Image (cartoon, helix red, strand yellow):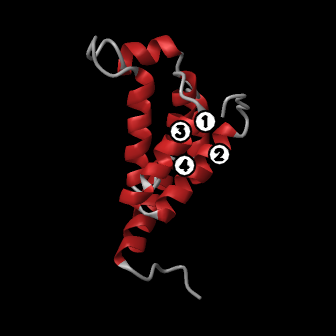
Amino acid sequence: MSDTPQNPFELMMKQAQDMAKAMNPAMESFSPKGFEALWPTMPKEVMEMMFGNTVNKDGLDARTRLLLTLAGLTCQGAQADAAVRQTVRHALEAGARKQEIVETIGQMSVFAGIPAMTRALDLAQEVMGDNEDEDQ
Protein backbone atom coordinates (compact mmCIF):
# COMPACT_ATOMS: atom_id res chain seq x y z
CA MET A 1 0.00 0.00 0.00
CA SER A 2 1.38 3.41 -0.93
CA ASP A 3 1.62 6.58 1.17
CA THR A 4 0.15 8.55 -1.73
CA PRO A 5 -3.16 10.21 -0.76
CA GLN A 6 -6.22 8.72 -2.43
CA ASN A 7 -8.41 11.82 -2.72
CA PRO A 8 -7.91 15.59 -3.20
CA PHE A 9 -8.55 16.41 0.48
CA GLU A 10 -5.95 13.90 1.67
CA LEU A 11 -3.50 15.29 -0.91
CA MET A 12 -4.12 18.85 0.29
CA MET A 13 -3.62 17.81 3.94
CA LYS A 14 -0.42 15.93 3.11
CA GLN A 15 0.95 18.94 1.21
CA ALA A 16 0.12 21.26 4.13
CA GLN A 17 1.79 18.88 6.60
CA ASP A 18 4.88 18.58 4.40
CA MET A 19 5.08 22.36 4.10
CA ALA A 20 4.74 22.81 7.88
CA LYS A 21 7.49 20.23 8.50
CA ALA A 22 9.77 21.96 5.97
CA MET A 23 9.24 25.34 7.66
CA ASN A 24 9.59 23.98 11.19
CA PRO A 25 10.73 20.36 11.70
CA ALA A 26 9.37 20.43 15.26
CA MET A 27 5.85 20.59 13.79
CA GLU A 28 6.08 16.86 13.10
CA SER A 29 5.50 16.18 16.79
CA PHE A 30 3.01 19.02 17.39
CA SER A 31 -0.02 18.13 19.48
CA PRO A 32 -3.09 20.34 20.05
CA LYS A 33 -3.07 19.18 23.68
CA GLY A 34 0.25 20.98 24.06
CA PHE A 35 -1.43 24.17 22.89
CA GLU A 36 -4.17 23.71 25.50
CA ALA A 37 -1.52 23.63 28.23
CA LEU A 38 -0.44 27.19 27.39
CA TRP A 39 -3.61 28.67 28.92
CA PRO A 40 -5.70 25.88 30.44
CA THR A 41 -8.29 28.13 32.12
CA MET A 42 -8.82 31.87 32.39
CA PRO A 43 -9.81 33.23 35.79
CA LYS A 44 -13.53 33.98 36.07
CA GLU A 45 -12.86 37.73 36.33
CA VAL A 46 -10.94 37.71 33.03
CA MET A 47 -13.75 35.78 31.36
CA GLU A 48 -16.33 38.30 32.63
CA MET A 49 -14.17 41.12 31.29
CA MET A 50 -13.64 39.49 27.88
CA PHE A 51 -16.89 37.56 27.36
CA GLY A 52 -19.35 38.97 29.84
CA ASN A 53 -20.14 42.29 31.39
CA THR A 54 -17.65 44.40 29.43
CA VAL A 55 -19.26 43.49 26.12
CA ASN A 56 -22.80 44.30 27.26
CA LYS A 57 -23.23 45.34 30.88
CA ASP A 58 -26.84 44.15 31.07
CA GLY A 59 -26.37 41.22 28.68
CA LEU A 60 -25.30 37.61 28.99
CA ASP A 61 -22.77 36.61 31.62
CA ALA A 62 -19.61 34.64 30.82
CA ARG A 63 -21.18 31.32 31.93
CA THR A 64 -24.07 31.69 29.50
CA ARG A 65 -21.82 32.86 26.67
CA LEU A 66 -19.56 29.84 27.19
CA LEU A 67 -22.52 27.43 27.18
CA LEU A 68 -23.62 29.02 23.89
CA THR A 69 -20.09 28.63 22.54
CA LEU A 70 -20.15 24.97 23.55
CA ALA A 71 -23.47 24.54 21.73
CA GLY A 72 -21.96 26.05 18.59
CA LEU A 73 -18.87 23.86 18.77
CA THR A 74 -21.11 20.81 19.18
CA CYS A 75 -23.13 21.83 16.12
CA GLN A 76 -19.90 22.01 14.12
CA GLY A 77 -19.55 18.31 14.76
CA ALA A 78 -17.16 18.74 17.71
CA GLN A 79 -14.30 18.84 15.23
CA ALA A 80 -12.09 21.09 17.34
CA ASP A 81 -11.18 18.84 20.28
CA ALA A 82 -9.04 21.45 21.99
CA ALA A 83 -11.72 24.14 21.66
CA VAL A 84 -14.42 21.90 23.14
CA ARG A 85 -12.26 20.83 26.09
CA GLN A 86 -11.12 24.39 26.73
CA THR A 87 -14.67 25.75 26.55
CA VAL A 88 -15.84 23.12 29.05
CA ARG A 89 -12.99 24.05 31.42
CA HIS A 90 -13.85 27.74 31.09
CA ALA A 91 -17.57 27.12 31.55
CA LEU A 92 -16.87 25.22 34.78
CA GLU A 93 -14.62 28.06 35.96
CA ALA A 94 -17.37 30.56 35.10
CA GLY A 95 -19.82 28.67 37.33
CA ALA A 96 -21.56 26.21 34.99
CA ARG A 97 -22.54 22.93 36.58
CA LYS A 98 -21.78 19.57 34.96
CA GLN A 99 -25.49 19.03 34.39
CA GLU A 100 -25.77 22.32 32.48
CA ILE A 101 -22.84 21.36 30.27
CA VAL A 102 -24.34 17.92 29.56
CA GLU A 103 -27.76 19.47 28.82
CA THR A 104 -26.22 22.07 26.50
CA ILE A 105 -24.45 19.37 24.49
CA GLY A 106 -27.47 17.03 24.59
CA GLN A 107 -29.80 19.74 23.30
CA MET A 108 -27.60 20.09 20.22
CA SER A 109 -28.27 16.47 19.19
CA VAL A 110 -31.46 17.74 17.55
CA PHE A 111 -29.46 20.14 15.36
CA ALA A 112 -26.05 18.49 15.03
CA GLY A 113 -26.95 14.80 15.23
CA ILE A 114 -26.16 12.01 17.64
CA PRO A 115 -22.54 11.45 16.49
CA ALA A 116 -21.63 15.12 17.05
CA MET A 117 -23.34 15.11 20.44
CA THR A 118 -21.58 11.90 21.47
CA ARG A 119 -18.19 13.24 20.42
CA ALA A 120 -18.73 16.49 22.34
CA LEU A 121 -19.88 14.55 25.42
CA ASP A 122 -16.76 12.36 25.25
CA LEU A 123 -14.55 15.45 25.07
CA ALA A 124 -16.44 17.15 27.90
CA GLN A 125 -16.13 14.02 30.06
CA GLU A 126 -12.34 14.13 29.61
CA VAL A 127 -12.44 17.50 31.38
CA MET A 128 -15.27 16.91 33.86
CA GLY A 129 -13.98 13.53 34.96
CA ASP A 130 -11.30 15.34 36.95
CA ASN A 131 -13.70 17.95 38.34
CA GLU A 132 -15.96 16.13 40.75
CA ASP A 133 -19.03 18.21 41.43
CA GLU A 134 -21.41 17.40 44.26
CA ASP A 135 -24.48 18.91 42.56
CA GLN A 136 -23.93 17.34 39.13
Q: Whole-Å distance between the Cαs marked 2 and 3?
A: 10 Å
Lower sequence index among marks 3 and 4: 4
Image coords of residue 57 (percent x, y)? 28, 11
- In this rendering, position of residue 134 left or right of residue 99: right
Please tell me whether mark 2 or mark 1 is closer to you in this view: 1
Are the residues tagged 3 and 4 within 8 Å (C-beta)?
A: no
- As drawn, 48 above or below 118: above
Which mark is on residue 71?
Answer: none
Residue linked to disc 4: 27
Residue linked to disc 3: 101
Which mark is on residue 98?
Answer: 1
Are the residues tagged 1 and 3 within 8 Å (C-beta)?
A: yes
Lower sequence index among marks 1 and 4: 4
Lower sequence index among marks 2 and 1: 1
Looking at the rendered structure, the secondary structure element under dot 1 is: helix
Quarter placement of the N terminus: bottom right
Q: For residue 113, what is the image quadrant?
A: bottom left
Please tell me whether mark 2 or mark 3 is closer to you in this view: 3
Please tell me whether mark 1 or mark 4 is closer to you in this view: 1
Give, as a three-letter code, the residue at label 2. Answer: Gln
Give, as a three-letter code, the residue at label 4. Answer: Met
Which mark is on residue 125?
Answer: 2
Across the whole image, how many numbered discs are drawn on residues?
4
Q: Nearer the viewer, residue 71 or 6?
A: 71
Give, as a three-letter code, the residue at label 1. Answer: Lys
